[in-house]
Image (cartoon, rainbow, N blue to C red):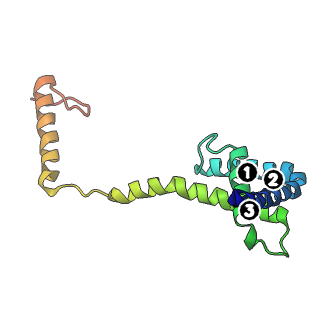
Amino acid sequence: MAMSRTAAPEGQDANAEREAFDRVLAPHFPELLQAAQREVRHRLTLGQFAPDDPTPEQLLDMALQRAWQERTRLSPTLGIKAWALASIFRMGEVLAARKAEPRREMTELLPEGVEPDPLYEEDDEDFWQSHELDYLQRHGRSPVGGRCER
């Protein structure tokens, strides 16, 4: 019972601190949402985000959660609004990098260019020559055009 009494005030302090953080950001929320919308549009244009993955609201929520977690790093000279705006950009960078990682791994697995196998290089030419001769015999003309004298 004594443990729950000591744990409750600590939990209440943390909740009160988070509520104070949210209250300070509340007047800036419309501007922060606009910044998240611009960031999502920008990342969509670059092909780094899929439509609605994330939505601007989701990006803002993730950014504010990250800003809350990193609040101890907040410089006294930097305002909380600037901190939140920077968090939106940083979260956009993080999400874009996560989405690019599987693509990067896949391209690293594939060779840049596949060299033709020398064993089959001459076969292509032989195939097309025999195909052209066969066509000439059946149709009396070249497959490329024109008549052929027999």
Q: Is residue 133 left or right of residue 59?
A: left
Task: From the image, tell me which residue sits under label 2.
Answer: 32
Please indicate, yes or no, whether residue 20 appears anywhere in the rendered image: yes
Q: Callout 1: few (<14), some (14-19), or many (20+) C-alpha neighbours within 10 Å?
A: many
Q: In the rendered structure, which amino acid carries the disc numbered 1?
A: Leu
The C terminus - image quarter: top left
In the image, what residue occupies the spot 74% across and 63% down?
86
CA distance for labels 2 and 1:
7 Å
Q: In the rendered structure, which amino acid carries the disc numbered 3?
A: Thr
Q: Which x, y percent locates residue 41?
A: 69, 47
CA distance for labels 3 and 2:
37 Å
In the image, what residue occupies the spot 32% across and 58% down?
111
- Please report contact status of discs 2 and 1: CB closer than 8 Å, yes or no: yes
Task: From the image, tell me which residue sits under label 1.
Answer: 60
| Residue, far front | 1
- Please report contact status of discs 3 and 1: CB closer than 8 Å, yes or no: no
Q: Which x, y percent locates residue 50?
A: 59, 43
In the image, what residue occupies the spot 14% across and 35% down?
131
Closer to viewer: mark 3 or mark 2: 3
Disc with the residue nearer the chain's start (3 vs 1): 3
**Secondary structure of residue under mark 1:** helix
**Secondary structure of residue under mark 2:** helix
| Count of marks, rendered view | 3
Q: In the rendered structure, which amino acid carries the disc numbered 2?
A: Leu
Closer to viewer: mark 3 or mark 1: 3
**Secondary structure of residue under mark 3:** helix
Task: From the image, tell me which residue sits under label 3.
Answer: 6
In the image, what residue occupies the spot 12% across and 54% down?
119
Please indicate, yes or no, whether residue 89 appears anywhere in the rendered image: no
